[in-house]
Image (cartoon, rainbow, N blue to C red):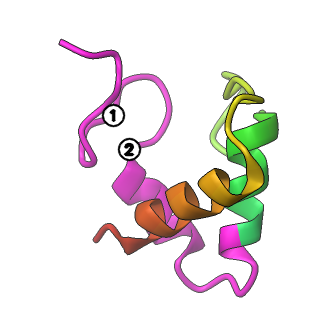
Amino acid sequence: MSGLPRDGEKLVGPSYKEVAAKYKDQKDAVATLAEKIQKGGVGAWGQIPMPANPQVNPEEAKQLAHWVLSLK
């Protein structure tokens, strides 16, 4: 079993589908999510921090953000 959630599954933070729903109407959603993927963050979904992923380059972060936003 991997440590990654399935797209509809919630482990600690929101599920990927919840993230997609929250950001679906934001014009800068891809850029916002790509930055959060790389730099991490706290406060958007409570006080549990999302860890940074510095090993993910900007293009990969954009691809991941597009994928998350494609979920319904």
Report the magenta stretch's main SS.
Answer: loop
Tell me whether the residue at label 1 lies in contact with that at label 2, contact meaning CB atoms closer than 8 angstroms: yes
Residue at 71%, 87% in the rendered image: 27
Amino acid type assigned to the residue bearing label 1 in the image: Lys
Residue at 45%, 23% in the rendered image: 12
Magenta includes 15? yes
Secondary structure state at the residue bearing disc 1: loop
Q: Which percent across, then down, holds residue 6?
A: 24, 38
Q: Seen from this angle, which residue lies furthest left?
A: 1
Name above or below for residue 47 compared with residue 6.
above
Q: Which percent across, then down, holds residue 10?
A: 33, 34
- Tell me if residue 41 can be seen: no
Q: Residues within 10 Å of mark 1 (few under 14, many from 20)?
A: few
Residue at 64%, 52% in the rendered image: 61
How many marks are shown on the rendered structure?
Answer: 2
Disc 1 target residue: 10
Name above or below for residue 68 compared with residue 47.
below
Q: CA distance from mark 1 to mark 2?
A: 5 Å
Q: Which residues are magenta?
A: 1-30
Amino acid type assigned to the residue bearing label 2 in the image: Ser
- Tell me if residue 37 can be seen: yes
Q: Seen from this angle, which residue lies furthest top?
A: 1
Secondary structure state at the residue bearing disc 2: loop
Disc 2 target residue: 15
Q: Residues within 10 Å of mark 2 (few under 14, many from 20)?
A: some
Q: Which percent across, then down, holds residue 56?
A: 67, 38
- The tag earlier along the polypeptide, 1 or 2, is 1
Which is more toward the observer, 30 or 42?
30
Q: In the rendered view of the protein, which quadrant contains the C terminus?
A: bottom left
Q: In the rendered view of the protein, which quadrant contains the N terminus?
A: top left
Residue at 66%, 71% in the rendered image: 30
